[in-house]
Image: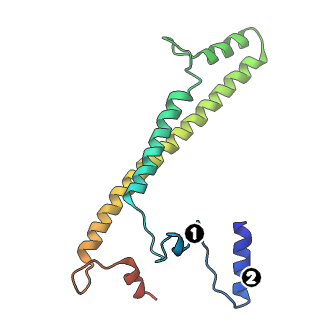
Amino acid sequence: MAWDEWEQIKAAQAAGRKSPHMRLNHVPADDGGGGSGDLVVYQDDLGAVGHEANLLYDDVKSQADIAAAGAGTGSTGSTMQAAAALKSHGFQTGGALQTTVEMWTSQVKAVLQACAHISDHLNYTKKRHAEDDAEIGAVLHGRDGSAVSVSQLNEYFT
């Protein structure tokens, strides 16, 4: 559906009726959405997403490790023990089960890395943007000494 909208906008622009632009997850200004065009990211939003990524990391780590499930004091989980037992009795299912556990474990590790990366990156982004805002705020001031907004800066470039 979004692709159709984009194609219609391009066709209208080619006909000279409308300038092309793309709207993603747009909320009209009268519905509480921002109409200024400034990109705004709130520190709380970044923190909330990073926190959710951290919670997902903890949940996946604690619940998705089938390779070690049922291991008790041993290092091999019950699923891998079953795979080894099946293989030792000549069942091809044992090898397939072992491959499945290895692939699952690989995918779980990839998800864990992604969650950790998201959480870490958002924490870094939050810190870095706060530093950038402080630095820009220290440099840019209006005539009355107040901070210059992004929308005011945009006027210089149009």
- Packing grade of label 1 (10 A; few <14, some 14-19, many >=20) is few
What residue appears at the point 74 percent right and 82 percent down from the top-left corner?
11
Query: As shown in the figure, which amino acid type bears the numbered disc 2?
Result: Ala
Q: CA distance from mark 2 to mark 1?
A: 21 Å
User: In this figure, which residue is indicated by the disc labeled 2?
Assistant: 11
What residue appears at the point 45 percent right and 41 percent down from the top-left corner?
54
Q: Horizontal and vertical percent for residue 93?
A: 76, 19
Q: Is residue 154 left or right of residue 103?
A: left
Q: Nearer the viewer, residue 109 or 137?
A: 137
In the picture, the quarter occupied by the N terminus is: bottom right
Q: Horizontal and vertical percent for residue 136?
A: 29, 72
Q: Nearer the viewer, residue 142 or 157?
A: 142
Q: Residue furthest bottom?
A: 16
Instruction: Answer above or below: position of 21 versus 98.
Output: below
Q: Which mark is residue 79?
A: none
* Colour scheme of the picture: rainbow
- Packing grade of label 2 (10 A; few <14, some 14-19, many >=20) is some
Q: Is residue 20 left or right of residue 120?
A: right
Q: Horizontal and vertical percent for residue 131?
A: 29, 62
What residue appears at the point 54 percent right and 28 percent down from the top-left corner?
63
Res 94 → quadrant = top right
Instruction: Answer above or below: position of 54 versus 66.
Output: below
User: In this figure, which residue is indicated by the disc labeled 1?
Assistant: 26
Query: As shown in the figure, which amino acid type bears the numbered disc 1?
Result: His
Secondary structure of residue under mark 2 = helix
Secondary structure of residue under mark 1 = loop
**Earlier residue among tags 2 and 1:** 2
Q: Horizontal and vertical percent for residue 113?
A: 50, 41
Q: Residue furthest front?
A: 30
